[in-house]
Image: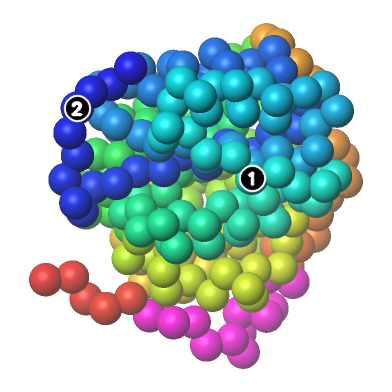
Amino acid sequence: MSTNTVSASDRCLVIIPTYNEKENIESIIRYVFGLSHPFDILIIDDGSPDGTAGIVKNLQKEFPQLHLIERSGKQGLGTAYITGFKWSLEQGYDYTFEMDADFSHNPDDLIRLHKACHEDGADLAIGSRYITGVNVVNWPMGRVLMSYYASVYVRVVTGMSVHDSTAGFVCYSRRLLSRMELDKVRFKGYAFQIEMKFTATKMGAKVVEVPIIFTNRVLGTSKMSGGIFSEAVFGVIRLKLSSLTRKYPQLDAKN
């Protein structure tokens, strides 16, 4: 476990939503806590019937920096993260991360996302699969193409320059997250990821993409579905149209 000290303006929280992740959850928690930079973890479990939350509770006896919020039933990825974001702000964290439990996101890359915000001044750092081509391992070709061209589609419709708009491996600065109108976030599935990045750009945030390699899960079952994906595709149009009349809060200029 990391024993590094952390400054008062560098508290980091990794939010990991879970549903039936008993095969992965202990390994991912131990890995994150073994990194060279100290990260706290918040697990948000949507009533996993496989006992995921019970595993987390046992690990809390060993790791005081491990936190758990249990919810009843599957309520959607977006609502899980919104719950986590609000908790992170209440607890005074400076950087808040999104990450999957299944090792599709390499926990080592948390260090690089943190650096992009803490040292390089980004408000939002995105672990990007597509900024340097297509860096996806063990996905079926059809899913790779669907994901890649969905991001192209989002760039065309929204005018965003972000290459990986559906990425779920990101770091938010408190400066950005505290100004975002979280109660106005509309989408619950993967369109949530697009909405958050689009909102950040409309607020004048400094958004950077950090190249990562995304590896498909080995253990457990994917939560991706056609309905989730269609929400992302059709939600983009509604997102763009609503932005024409919505006034977004603006970030103050940095010193």
Q: Quadrant of the N terminus?
A: top left
Circle 2 packing at 10 Å, graded few (<14), some (14-19), many (20+), is few
Residue highlighted by disc 1:
69
Q: Is residue 253 above or below residue 42?
A: below
Q: With respect to residue 234, does 202 lie above or below? A: below
Give the image quarter of residue 46: top right
Query: Which residue is painted at 46% across and 21% down in the image?
Result: 62
Q: Position of residue 149 (x, y in %)?
A: 66, 41
- Among numbered discs 1 and 2, the one appearing first in the sequence: 2
Q: Is residue 179 left or right of residue 24?
A: left
Instruction: Judge left or right: residue 48 versus residue 108.
Output: right
Give percent across and percent down for residue 172: 40, 53
Query: Could you tell me which residue is drawn at 52 percent across and 68 percent down?
Result: 199
Residue 69 in percent (x, y) is at 64, 45
Q: Is residue 243 magenta?
A: yes
Residues tagged 1 and 2 counted as in contact (Cβ below 8 A): no
Answer whether residue 102 is visible to the viewer in this image.
no
Identity of the residue drawn at 80% across and 51% down = 75
Q: Is residue 245 above or below residue 229?
A: below
Give the spatial CA distance, label 1 vs label 2.
26 Å
Indicate yes or no whether the magenta region holds residue 43: no
| Amino acid marked by disc 1 | Ile
189 above or below 136?
below
Quickly name the residue at label 2: 4
Q: Residue furthest left?
A: 255
What secondary structure is marked by label 2?
loop
Q: Quadrant of residue 32?
A: top left
In the image, the segment drawn in magenta is 238-250
Name the amino acid type tagged 2. Asn
Determine crowd level at label 1: few under 14, some 14-19, many 20+ residues with C-alpha closer than 10 A.
Answer: some
Instruction: Looking at the picture, tell me which residue is in the foreground, 163 or 252.
Output: 252
Asked whether residue 238 is in view, the answer is yes
